[in-house]
Amino acid sequence: MARVGDRRHGPSLGRAPRERLQCGPGTHGVSRPSMSDLAPSVGCMPGLVVEQQLSLDDLGTPLCDVTFVVVDLETTGGKPVDAGITEIGAVKVRGGEVLGEYQTFVNPGVPIPPFIAALTGITDRMLAGAPSVTAAVAGFWEFARGAVLVAHNAPYDMSFLRGAGDKADLPWPGPRVVDTARIARRAIARDEVRNCKLETLSRLFHSPTPPCHRALDDARATVAVLHGLMERMGPLGVHCLEDLLAFGGRTTPQQRTKRHLAGDLPEAPGVYIFRNAQGHALYVGTSRNIRSRVRSYFTASEQRKRMSEMVGLADRVDPIVCATDLEARVRELRLIAEHKPPYNRRSRHPERQVWLALTREPHPRVVTVSAVRESHLAAIGPFASRGAATLASEALHEALPLRTCTDRLPRGPRRDAGCVRGQLGQCAAPCARSGDSDAYAVTAQRALAAFSGDSRAVVTAIHDRMATLAETGRFEQARSWRDRLESYVRASVRRHRLAALAEAEEVVAAQLVDGAWHIHVIRYGRLAAAGVAPRGEDPRPVVDALLMSGDSVEPGTALTEETDLLWRWLVDARLVRTSTPLSLPIHVGGEVADSLRRAREAAETLRYTADRRGLRPSA
């Protein structure tokens, strides 16, 4: 692949030759402009910024430049795995200035114990209309994106956030965490305070907001404690983020001896690869600042046992500087798929996918497969797991009386009687002389339509089943059919959006990020080129340069996960040009999938009310 710049950083996606495009100053809260903003008619001036070598600050990231998100949780007092969060409060600060605050009640899905209600003042009535744990935690991570987390007694808060993520199947973002309680035990003399509780420290540092067992007020108090501790640690030589992370805990001998591995890394966005002495990839990751992120692996903030073990085996770190965050994420996927590093858990085996396919035979049936082949009429997926594929298969069989037997049937029936499903009317029994082959052929055509982007038959059948169950008070069974329908519709939508992008010869799109245009060229579902154009300059020469230097891509060579990632990026991007229109079948079910997701989240929010009133069945 074409690459401009220092060859030590490894191969890169195609870019504008000889020149590197430099981002302008970051801005937040900018409204999404139209594509007319990309034209010179609005006053843009052509020109490119020549790439310059970034200087390395051996002292790390100054504390005044670090964005901290100070967070506090109120909970039901149960186990973290139950994710019993009742309130989230957070304050975003940088350089002593408050940038924003985040506060929300959270419906934990269970009643609040009386002693917790008395302690916090939070009651079940206050949480009746609150967001679910999934929605609230997702909103918090969006607020805290890219920041260093701070909490008083951080392991407690982090365990509940991790438990909520596991319960909702949200990926753990792996933030760097500062624990003010641990730092206080080292920075404050024992004869100065009787303990290191938040209430005690807030009085010591004269916090304007006293803690009161409410999330936002406690977070505000923790901000005052954090700033007070920073003043105490200045004379102790703590001036940068890396020093702060190391001050709050103990590093292992391996971390201390390997710290030099981050010394020559660039302070730029991209991918980093930990390698052992033999050159084998151990771990692949991405970051907006490679050097800063790699340095964090050698501080006390890194508590993961797998990562500590990996650091002990690492012999060097190879950086790959990328133009955009999207390019870095794509490279990460490709490198993990190629090298299968043992300390990466996700995306190591893209070949291990799960699909539902309709077989190409006289009497088609639905099968679960790991790859789509010529022997299949159509397919949907890939699914996140075999269990999700089973749910979708059950929805299809409920709506369409397809056979479930695994025998390869001849065109003409040879048996006198069909199987049990045929006798129950759940299959047209094309295998039996008493069956109806013509009726099965009609069912097969409807199934092909359901696999080809027309979800109406399945949606209607499952909706009718859910309505019948709800009318008879069997709400749990109705919910299970809702989950089956959602699994089918989501897989159908994903299959067709992957196909739409994988079949497009060329797509050029741009997205405004921190005041600069991130421009990408996508060919047959694979990222071919990436570049950045500062806002205020004509981006069309950049587009032309990327088109000329971009990779040549053969159809069918893109990773499914990469194509899916690119499609999700395109949803919020502006199309510059495309060889073919990007469209989905009108009845594929995208709006149905959204409504089912909202219904599931609403059910999670209201379920605890049904528990309290005894409306849910006990079994």
Image (cartoon, rainbow, N blue to C red):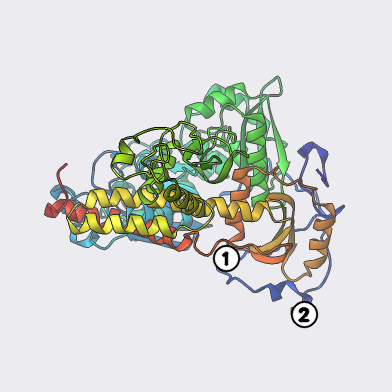
Residue beneath the point at 49% across and 41% down:
363
Q: Is residue 274 left or right of residue 579?
A: left
Which numbered circle lies on residue 28? 1
First reached walking from the N terminus: tag 2 or tag 1: 1
Q: Quadrant of the C terminus?
A: top left
Q: Give the class, few, some or many, for how many residues have Cα within 10 Å of label 2's Cα (few <14, many ≥20).
A: few
Which numbered circle lies on residue 240? none
Q: Nearer the viewer, residue 553 or 533?
A: 553
Structural distance between the alpha carbons of marks 2 and 1:
24 Å
For label 2, the residue is 41
Work out whether residue 226 can be spotted. no
Q: Is residue 272 above or below residue 203?
A: above
Q: Quadrant of the N terminus?
A: top right
Q: Element under label 1?
A: loop
Q: Is residue 476 left or right of residue 503?
A: left
Q: Nearer the viewer, residue 201 or 584?
A: 584
Give the foreground label among 2 and 1: 2
Residue beneath the point at 48% across and 57% down:
93
Q: Amino acid at mark 1?
A: His
- Give the percent coordinates (x, y) of residue 239: 57, 45
